[in-house]
Amino acid sequence: MITSRANPKIKQLLQLQKPRERRAQGIVVIEGMRELRRAAASGWSFSELYLCDDLVKLADRNFAEELASQCRTERISREVFEHIAYRENSDGILALAKEPKLSLSTLSPGDNPLILVLEAVEKPGNLGAIMRTADAAGVNAVLVCDPATDLFNPNAIRSSVGCIFTVPVRACTSEEALRWLKSKNIAINATSLIASQNYLDTDFTKPTAIVMGTEADGLTQFWTQHSDNRIRIEMQGIADSLNVSVAAAIVTFEAIRQRRGKK
């Protein structure tokens, strides 16, 4: 059992808290039983596992031991685990996985797809919340264009409650996303306050992409100029914007409502 914070493996884990180091090594850090269950169910495999038996709940022990039998495992003390954990009240399990090589060419949108496109998302928490919405709504894929955060940032994984593993997600440039959407004949609905129509008056029943920008700046001209429709959520109070994850949920579930009504 590892009981010292000075252990080389613990020092390595602490280095992986830095985005630059994760990118350099191509490593994804996944903490939490729920997140690991969803990653495993989605076909992910793990290279290393770190367990604190004192923190693992009785109901989770069989799953933890199953994972431990499949990869190199280190058991560590409560004090050391709490030192490396990303969250408070952790449930005693953390795994490392190789970051998958994902490209648009391997993405199959299916029949009548509903796609979410995020431009220059900065906050891992917003990305995770949108992935949770995408899973709940049954979105076919999420394209993250020109991201300012890594897709599998530990905070994105946590805020998605593992749903970042259950919905196809791709990082790409805006130009690549546009070409892919056009090649699939997917209508592009860009959220914009300028020259736009109410999202409630927009037809989302055909192959559809909903494009969301940042809270501070909204979408760039690239997307507003190349969209088929510009849409907005009409505001009734003094607020002039919504959190991007909230806006994405509102428009996405309107699309789902329309599609259910069409059946």
Image (cartoon, grey):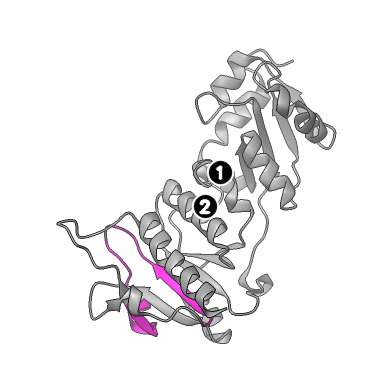
Q: Measuring 81% from the left and 36% from the top, which residue is drawn there?
A: 71
Query: How busy is the neighbourhood of tag 1: few (under 14 within 10 Å), some, or many (20 plus)?
Result: many
Residue type (three-letter) at the residue carrying disc 1: Val
Residue 117 is situated, as x and y percent measured from the top left of the image, at: 47, 68
Examine the image and state in which quarter residue 213 appears.
Answer: bottom left
Find out whether the residues at labels 1 and 2 contact each other: C-beta distance under 8 Å: yes
Name the N-terminal-most of marks 1 and 2.
2
Examine the image and state in which quarter residue 241 appears.
Answer: bottom left
The residue lying furthest to the left in this view is 238
The residue lying furthest to the right in this view is 69
Where the C terminus falls, by quadrant?
bottom right
Query: Between marks 1 and 2, how big is the CA–CA gap?
Result: 7 Å
Q: Which mark is residue 90?
A: none
Name the one closer to the observer, 20 or 149.
149
Q: Can residue 249 be seen here?
A: yes
Examine the rendered structure and indicate whether residue 200 appears above or below residue 185.
above
Q: Is 133 situated left or right of 96 in this image? A: left
Q: Which mark is residue 161?
A: 1
Q: Is 223 situated left or right of 161 in this image? A: left
Q: Can residue 120 be seen here?
A: no
| Span shown in magenta | 206-230
Residue 175 is situated, as x and y percent measured from the top left of the image, at: 47, 77
Q: Is 151 situated left or right of 7 in this image? A: left
208 in magenta:
yes
- Mark 1 lies on a secondary structure that is loop
Q: Which residue is mark 2?
A: 132
Where the N terminus falls, by quadrant?
top right
- Mark 2 lies on a secondary structure that is helix
